[in-house]
Amino acid sequence: TKCPTCHGTGWVLDTGGAAPVAKRCQCFHDRQNELLIEQANIPRRYKNCTFKNFEGHDDSQRDALKISRHFVKNYPALDVGLLFIGSCGVGKTHLAVATIQELIVKKGVPCIFYDFRDLIREIQSTFTPDSTLSESDVLGPVFQKDVLVLDELGAKRTTAWVEETVFYIINHRYNHKKITIFTSNYPDTEDEEDTRESFYKKGGDTLVDRIGVRLRSRIYEMCKIVEIGGEDYRRKIKQASYRF
């Protein structure tokens, strides 16, 4: 159906000034935002993630929400992205997705979401003889989008090839001053007593164990670290569903 304001032209006449001026109709911006959301590669599970429906019951969750809102408000006058660190189900991916959805809707920023494992698999699949995509086809949007979310950093244990590939991606964005948002389940410390006992089960890997020292160092330069505590929201929902 045609827009009742511009009748499908995408333009309206602003008569509020000294002389009438043609400007884009709101429907034009809405269509642009819809296209950006579609191109952002957000998984269906997270399509409805917003700041408004983020349930932050822990102080660190509420702080992370404030930081995320502040990030959107100040974009693009930012030098660093965000690294959300916390155990499973505390809202890291929700906040990361909500942040890029806000950037798209409020500021028209081209963004893209990738699960760390999926990105590695997609790159690897381009090396097969029957692949219709080249490595540059996969990496093009990852390099070019203004904001990249790389979810579950470290979920795939690093190999020399994985570490080199991810460093190449991250370093390219760093050199071109592109903002990147990461999430990770792995504590960003080697202090076993401090973090592994308070955040995770004792004895687990740290982030540096999963991605290597060089990549961790680069991410430190690129991001503000946001640690999130709290209960596993998904586990609470699952337990509630079994109550009769």
Image (cartoon, rainbow, N blue to C red):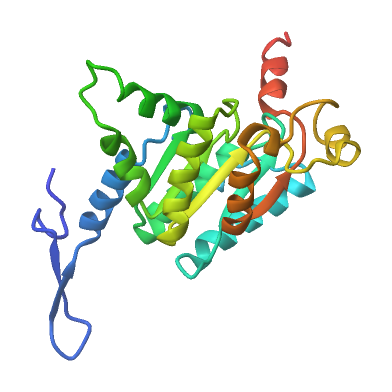
Q: Position of residue 130 (x, y in %)?
A: 22, 15
Q: Residue at x 36, y 56 (%)?
A: 109
Q: Quadrant of the N terminus?
A: top left
Of residues 227 and 137, the one nearer the viewer is 137
* Residue 240 position in % (x across, y down): 71, 18
Out of 141 and 25, give the one closest to the viewer: 141
The residue most toward the bottom is 18
Q: Which residue is outermost to the right?
A: 193
Count of all numbered marks drawn on residues in the image: 0
User: Looking at the image, which residue is at 34% across and 22% down?
Assistant: 125
Say if 72 sits above or below 233 in the image. Answer: below
Whether residue 198 is visible here, answered yes or no, is: yes
Q: Residue 99, percent across and down? A: 51, 50
Q: Is residue 157 left or right of residue 205?
A: left
Foreground residue among 85 and 135: 135
User: Based on the displayed image, in which of its 4 quarters is residue 139 positioned?
Assistant: top left
- Answer above or below: position of 8 versus 113: below
Left or right: 107 as drawn, with respect to 211: left
**Residue at the location (91% across, 37% down)?**
193
Residue 66, image x, y percentages: 65, 57
Q: Is residue 38 left or right of residue 162?
A: left
Q: Residue at x 30, y 25 (%)?
A: 126
Residue 243 vertical placement versus 56 (above, below): above
Q: Quadrant of the C terminus?
A: top right
> Can residue 102 be seen in the rendering of this structure?
no
Q: Quadrant of residue 128?
A: top left
Question: On the rendered structure, is 194 left or right of 174?
Answer: right
